[in-house]
DNA sequence: AAGCCGGGGTT
DNA sequence: AACCCAGGCTT
């Protein structure tokens, strides 16, 4: 069956697609891979400055494999989903050690690398090596769900399976590199989530959802669920030198591996913070100064952060190691910090408005 | 199958 | 404030 789908899409891409993205320059598997990981659940405009800074610091897979993990995390600070950064470096080390520094051109082998799933593996194979492989990211899901009027939320296995079948069926044997970029560009520029520009779409005449006047009904939306509210104290422990005590978060869980302010049990009253710092950290502190609290929202819960500033009289008492350490303000800001903590340390008045 | 994992842009 | 974004991993 002749694929009008791919032909029309490619014709549109030649005239209207995005041909100037940073990862298109000097394209190689490393650059494609880093861009694909950064772009997971993250919009193109957000990624671009991070990608450029990352490439300047880690120009190839060896530079990334050999870098201190804190250096990698600091370049990820503010991007979110920090497991991506740790998986990225782990995969770089695997590529150097097991693949001689060359990314495989086989999706199955790519999927063995940390952080690379089915769609990302296909994107690397298609973009970097021009080999036929079907991708299915958020853009492609939307285009295909509308084109074929596939009902249901793509988070459901049955829906996802149908979309993958359509994705495989439409992927051409030739110009795979361009096709892959084309279908993502169409989803990002024309077949947008709201107010799709159907009048400008090269696939309009065969689009089932459009024929029904129901483009925006697809794909089905995720079932909504109330996000729980959590709360925590964040201690800004400052010594006479103006240094701040930071704590490295465990590798798994929220903000995994990042440096952050020490958290204290939310059950504590403001009048108990002083004693608690002495008992838990061995720090003798002055009276806590309460900073305006603010609410930070994650994908699955809200967190109310109540900062408290305490002056520390015996800074040396706290451990100075890989988990708990004192930093001058500038040193702290050079680390991988969670976005709201960075805001709190740079513009506390801004944080209060969040 | 469902939950976990961020931050920001859009509506 | 809800929704979603060039998803993958864990349970």
Image: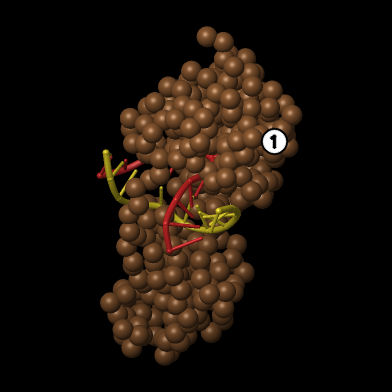
Chain colours: A brown, B yellow, C red
User: What x and y, as percent, mark residue A48?
Assistant: 65, 47
Which residue is situated farthest in the bottom direction here? A287
Q: As drawn, is A54 to the left or to the right of A315?
A: right
Task: Identify the residue at horizontal 58%, vertical 25% (top origin).
Answer: A205
Q: As drawn, is A345 to the left or to the right of A285?
A: right
User: What x and y, as percent, mark residue A110?
Assistant: 48, 27
Q: Nearer the viewer, residue A186 or A28?
A: A186
Q: How busy is the neighbourhood of tag 1: few (under 14 within 10 Å), some, or many (20 plus)?
A: some
Q: Nearer the viewer, residue A88 or A125?
A: A125
Residue A173 vertical position relative to residue A269 in the rendered view, above or below:
above
Residue C9 vertical position relative to residue A297 in the rendered view, above or below:
above
Residue A122 visible from this viewpoint: no
Residue A21 visible from this viewpoint: yes
Which residue is situated farthest in the front direction here? A212
Task: Identify the residue at horizontal 72%, vertical 33% (top origin).
Answer: A16
User: What x and y, as percent, mark residue A152?
Assistant: 37, 36
Examine the image and state in which quarter residue A103 appears: top right
Residue A68 vertical position relative to residue A28 in the rendered view, above or below:
below
Task: Identify the residue at horizontal 69%, vertical 33% (top origin).
Answer: A17
Residue A126 vertical position relative to residue A238 in the rendered view, above or below:
above
Q: Secondary structure at mark 1?
A: loop
Q: As drawn, is A101 to the left or to the right of A302?
A: right
User: What x and y, as percent, mark residue A213?
Assistant: 51, 36
Residue to which mark 1 is pinned: A18
């Amino acid at each position: 069956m002749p694929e009008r789908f791919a032909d029309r899409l490619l014709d549109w891409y030649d005239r209207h697609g995005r041909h100037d993205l940073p990862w298109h320059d000097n394209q190689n598997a490393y650059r494609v891979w880093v861009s694909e990981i950064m772009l997971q659940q993250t919009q193109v405009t957000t990624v671009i400055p991070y990608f450029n800074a990352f490439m300047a610091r880690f120009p190839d897979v060896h530079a990334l494999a050999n870098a201190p993990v804190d250096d990698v995390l600091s370049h990820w600070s503010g991007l979110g989903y920090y497991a991506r950064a740790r998986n990225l470096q782990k995969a770089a080390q695997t590529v150097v050690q097991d693949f001689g520094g060359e990314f495989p051109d086989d999706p199955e082998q790519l999927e063995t690398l940390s952080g690379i799933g089915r769609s990302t593996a296909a994107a690397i194979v298609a973009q970097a090596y021009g080999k036929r492989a079907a991708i299915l990211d958020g853009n492609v899901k939307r285009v295909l769900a509308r084109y074929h009027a596939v009902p249901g939320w793509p988070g459901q296995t049955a829906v996802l399976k149908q979309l993958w079948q359509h994705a495989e069926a439409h992927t051409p044997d030739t110009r795979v590199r361009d096709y892959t970029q084309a279908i993502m560009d169409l989803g990002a520029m024309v077949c947008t989530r709201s107010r799709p520009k159907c009048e400008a779409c090269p696939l309009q005449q065969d689009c089932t959802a459009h024929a029904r006047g129901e483009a925006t009904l697809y794909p089905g939306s995720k079932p909504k669920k109330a996000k729980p509210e959590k709360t925590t104290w964040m201690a800004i422990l400052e010594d006479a030198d103006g240094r701040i005590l930071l704590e490295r978060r465990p590798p798994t869980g929220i903000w995994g591996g990042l440096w952050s302010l020490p958290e204290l049990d939310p059950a504590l009253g403001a009048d108990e913070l002083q004693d608690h710092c002495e008992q838990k950290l061995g720090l003798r502190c002055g009276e806590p100064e309460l900073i305006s609290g603010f609410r930070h929202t994650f994908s699955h819960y809200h967190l109310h952060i109540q900062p408290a500033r305490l002056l520390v009289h015996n800074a040396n008492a706290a451990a100075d190691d890989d988990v708990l350490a004192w930093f001058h303000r500038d040193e702290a800001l050079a680390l991988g910090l969670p976005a709201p903590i960075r805001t709190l340390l740079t513009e506390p008045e801004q944080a209060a408005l969040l």
